[in-house]
Image (cartoon, rainbow, N blue to C red):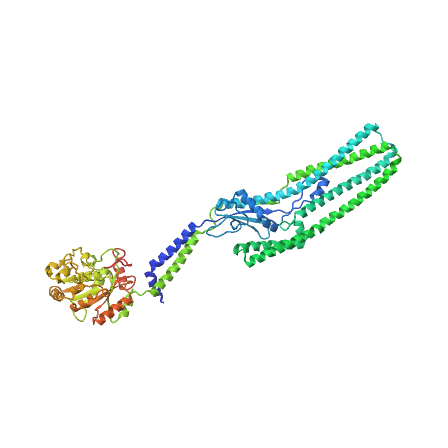
Amino acid sequence: MELARIWEIILRRRLLIIQAALVAGLVAFIASYAAVPSYNAYSKILLLQAKKGVIDIGAVGSQLASMIKTSADVDVNRVVAASRPYVDRMVYRLQLRDEEGNLIRADQPEVTTIKTRFFPRASINVTQYRDTDILQIRGTSPDAEEAMMMANTLAEIMVDQNQEMMRAEYRGAGEFLQDQLKKVKEAYNKALFDLTDFMKKEKTLDLKTETKLVAEKMAELLAQKEDNIIDLAEARAELNQLKKQLARQDSEFVGASTLKESPQIEILKKRLTQLRLDFSKANFELTERHPRVLSLGEQIRMAEGALKREIEVYRSSAPELVALETRIVALEAHLKGVNVVIEKYLGDLGGLPDKTLKRESLGMELNVTQGTYKSLLDSLYQMGMAEATTLSEIRIIERAVKPVSPESPNKTLNTSMGCFVGLVFGLGIAFLMEYLADTVRTAEDVNEFKPIALIGTVPGFEEGRLPLISEKDPNDPLYESYRNIRNYLKMNESPVKTLLISSPGPGEGKSTTVVNLGISVCREGKKVAIVDMDLRRASLHTYFDLPNDVGVGDLLQGKTSLDETLQPTGVEGLSIIPSGTPFPDPGGLIESEQMGRLMSELKTRFDMVLLDSAPVLVKSDVLVLSRYVDGCIIVLESTRTTRRAVHEVLDLLAKARIRPLGLVLNRFSMQKGKHFYQHRYYGHYGGELSTDGGNSV
């Protein structure tokens, strides 16, 4: 298809193309406007390395502090942040509810994913900045403030939970110290009571000189025993704490130290996490009975079992556990040895006075329990201070702010894309309609009906206005078009004094052509009569606002004379005979002898007689009236009259041995051809003329 032809089609179908683009753009805009907006808010948190204690918690506390584990692993915290407990806390704190008013569950799609872009739901997402210890929390919600609060609340929950976990470790150590302190206090009170009671009963305060050396050795041994007891208590406390930590571990929670010391558990934990992620994704995209969902569920159960078995093995064979048990055995053996030596020295003191030995023994026991009690009390205080001053390893480095504009939908982009798609669709429809269309549009289309010639083209006019050229400037394209038709008739081989004008169907402009052609002939100083022979659908009288009480029907019936029927039109030299009173059989009147006598009389009184006949394909009046005229022309309406209709008209006329003088293309677009250039030459833009045509009679 040539570019000129393509451009012509675009111009002709421009309204359709523009409407398609506007409708598609409007639909996209309305859809974007109706779509629930989705806002994104971002907060950032920093994971610090495992912090060192800044408070001196004493010798006993230092041993207990080694039991407190910290972790700043980015991947672990990223998984933990998006875990169910954390999300549930965020949902409860913000009171996020679904359409039914129920709190949203962490396993619901409304929280973990965006259901659709048209109706977005609240969602949370945690990502890591590459090669950094920074996590970004993205809150997404149809409400901008809610998105901001989601991102900030989850960050705050991570900080609080991390701090709470570390405080719980200190709290556990403090509880152990309190238990030990209670026991030591009971021992101290008992030793103090025994010593006081002994001194009251024996009434003695001095020690024997000979017992001094033995007593010093005993003090040294008892000090060793004290240290041994403390070490043994600390080791047992560490063992109990470690067993508690190991007992809390399951497939859902595995300590960082366990992952570090057991590569097999770490591998199983990562595999279980990946399987759960795959299961969540598959369960969202597929049905719960889908083979992949069932397979992933079975794999998760197998992985959980394997992880559980591996944890059970680790619980009984953890390196720290074995080391502590070995240490306890060694301390118990050492304590047993110290007790044996003490018993030996006690035997050596058998010869000393019993009361002196008893007094020294009670005094040393009191000193030992008093020192132990003081040490534990100080450690307990320092442990409480450590718990109270514990800071989270997670820091909020950037809080989310309320987003100003939604992330989606992008109304401008969507509208532009809609207009573009509509434009492409409109072009496609235009070319398809052009391909399927069977109507006559241009002069080139009329050329296929040769040898019947195109004798004129009439431009379109504004809808609702009767285009009488008597009101036009002689330079107007509409006026010029009828002048061209008139000149063509003048150049015909035989003079044309009577002319029949018709069309294939109604409303294609035959009556307008009759009126304006008559006016054009009158401008040469000739007398013209126009006769409305469309006795079923009369319209000529409406062009001049004349009555239709008496007309050709009455004249053919002999009810009136020609002089009584002829009416002036207001245009010099132009007279009209309207159709008159309706008659039951208009075809019979046309075939009567009175019709021939009427035409003969009109020829003698007028220079030209123009007949407006019923459409060729509607009634056969043209075939009858053609006997009384010198020729006929057929009016075609551009973009309305079909090629098939024209062929049927020409075939019908050919069978009746009637050859039209030519064809007139009415309501022709002036975007191309000489009329377009005349229109530009004379400057008649806008005004009374329009290139998109209008209604014709």
Q: Left or right of 210: which side holds 146?
A: left
State the residue at coordinates (75%, 41%): 230
Q: Left or right of 536: which side holds 261?
A: right
Splitting the image into 4 quarters, where does residue 215 fall? top right
Q: Left or right of 469: which side holds 311?
A: right
In this orientation, does residue 204 appear? no
| Quarter placement of the C terminus | bottom left
Number of callouts in the render? 0
| Quarter placement of the N terminus | bottom left
Q: Nearer the viewer, residue 303 or 442?
A: 303
249 lies above or below 600: above
State the residue at coordinates (77%, 41%): 229
Q: Quick one: which residue is furthest to the right in this view?
A: 351
Residue 146 position, x and y percent, is: 50, 45
Residue 429 position, x and y percent, is: 37, 61
Splitting the image into 4 quarters, where does residue 275 fall? bottom right
State the residue at coordinates (23%, 71%): 654
Residue 212 position, x and y percent, is: 86, 34
Residue 450 position, x and y percent, is: 26, 71
Splitting the image into 4 quarters, where does residue 164 fall? top right
Q: Nearer the viewer, residue 159 or 489?
A: 159
Q: Nearer the viewer, residue 524 or 335?
A: 335
In this orientation, does residue 103 appear? yes
